[in-house]
Amino acid sequence: MYSNKRCNCDWKASHSFGFAALCDNGSLIGWLTLKERLLPQYLKDRGFHTTLWENGIWDIRLKNSLQRTEDLTHILDTGLGNKITTVIFPLMEKIQMVMDAGDMISEIILKFIVMSLVSMNEAIRLIYNQPTDKPMFLMINHIAPHSANSYDPLQAPRENVNKFRSTIKDENRRKYAGMVDKLDESVGLIIEALSRKKLLSNSIIVFASDNGGAPEGFDLNYSSNWPLRGVKNTLWEGGTRVAAAVWSPFIKSRVSRDIMHAQDWVPTLYEASGGDTRDLKGIDGVSLWKTFTEGHPSPRTSFLYNIDDIYNNSAVREGPWKLIQGNTSSVDLGGGVWDFWYGPSGRSDGLPLVNALVPKIASSTAAKAMVYSGLRLNLTRMGEMQSAAEFLCDQKTTKQVPCNAYQTPCLFNVEEDPCELVQLADRYQPLFSVVSY
C-alpha cells in the first residue's frame, strides 16, 4: 500500500486543495475544513457508532475531528516536549518496569507506556460496551512505534526489549523491536476482545502504517525500509510504500500486489459496509473491496505521490512506471541526504527466515483469539504468505543505473524494480515524455 511520505498529512488537504507543502510543515492551513466529509460521517449515515482514539496534539485540528465522530474518546497531549496530561496520571500505579541500575525513566518512555496502556484499555472498554446489534467503526492511532527526535530517543519497556536479546545484537534495534512488540500486544488484546464479544466473525480489521521508517542517522532512529530506497519524508518507495494488512472472514487470504493508496480506504470500507460508492462525492479514492473479496484487478492504476513547491519535489505513478524529480531528500528532519538504501536487512547474523516465525505468530494473542472464535489457522499457508510478502532486490548482481532527480527527472519500472535501482528515462524517452506530461 502507498501512503503519504510523512505523518499528520491528509491526502485531501494536500492535493485537492493544493496544501501539500504547508501540510507537510504542520501548518493549520493544510488541514481539512469542516465542510469536508470523512469516513466516520459516511458510516454514521449507515447506522455505525464511530469512535476515534487519537494519540496526538490537542489543537484546532483535533477539535475539528471531534465534530466528525460521535466519540472522540480522549485527546491526550503528547506533543513533543510537552508534559503528560493529568488525565493519565492515575494509570501510573499500573506501570511496572524493571530498570537497569542507574537507569532513569525519561518523559518519553512514560508517555510511551502510558499511552499504549490507555489506547489499548480504552479500545477494549469500547468493544465490550458496544451493543451487538449496532455496527461500530473504531480507529486507533497508536503511538507505538514512532520516530524518535534528536532530543528524545527510542525507548520501550525493558521486558519487551529483553525478548530480543538472543536475536538482535544492536541494542538500539532491540529497543525499536520492543516498541513493535508492545504494539503487537495491544493489537492482540483488542482482537481478543472482539473475539470474546463474538464480533470477530463479522469484523474487518485494517492494520496499516502512515509512512516509511526513519533509519539510523535520521535523528535517533533505528528502523529499516530495506531493500526499498529512501526513508520517511522522501518520495522514494522506502518513504511511501508501507506495510499494510487486512483481515476479515470475508476476505480470502493472499498476498496482494494490487496498487492501493491510503485515500482508497474511504470508498473501500464504505462499500464493505454495504454502501454505494456513488454516494461519495468529490473524492479521489477508489474502492478495492471487490479486489479484496473477489480477486478483481485493482481499479487504481495511477496516483500522485506528492507535489511540493517548497521542497521542490514531486512524483507520480502511471501503471508500472514512476516518475520522480526535484529535491528528493528533505533536510529539515534528521539532516543530510537520504536518497539511497538503508538497512539493516534483517537477513544476517544467522537470523531465521520469515516463514520460520510462523509458530510464534500462531501462538500470539491475536492468533489464539481467532482460534477461540472457531477460526482455523493454516500454518503452511501462513508460511507461504510470509515468504511471498518479501521484496527481494539483488543489489549485487543488478547493473544499477544512477539517478540524480535534482538534476533531471528519473523514470523507474517499480513493478520490476521496486528498489529503484535502474533509471530508465534515457532508454524509454517517448514513454518518459508521456509520463512527464
Image (tube, rainbow, N blue to C red):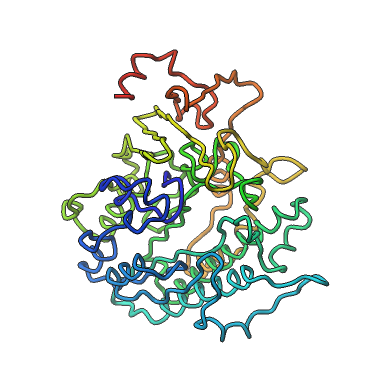
Residue occupying the point 54% across, 53% down? 378
Residue 172 sits in quarter:
bottom right
Along the horizontal axis of the image, is 82 left or right of 322? right
x and y percent of residue 48 in the render? 27, 70
Q: Between residue 201 and residue 130, name the one nearer to us.
A: 130
Along the horizontal axis of the image, is 94 left or right of 417? right
From the viewer's perspective, is residue 150 above or below residue 65? Answer: above
Q: Between residue 277 and residue 106, name the one nearer to us.
A: 106
Residue 163 sits in quarter:
bottom right
Along the horizontal axis of the image, is 419 left or right of 32? right
x and y percent of residue 195 in the render? 46, 71
Q: Residue furthest right?
A: 101
x and y percent of residue 213 in the render? 55, 48
Q: Quadrant of the C terminus?
A: top left
Residue occupying the point 60% across, 59% down? 180
Count the marks: how many? 0
Q: Quadrant of the N terminus?
A: top left
x and y percent of residue 132 in the render? 33, 77
Residue occupying the point 43% across, 42% down? 256
Q: Between residue 180 and residue 7, name the one nearer to us.
A: 7
Residue occupying the point 24% across, 65% down? 41
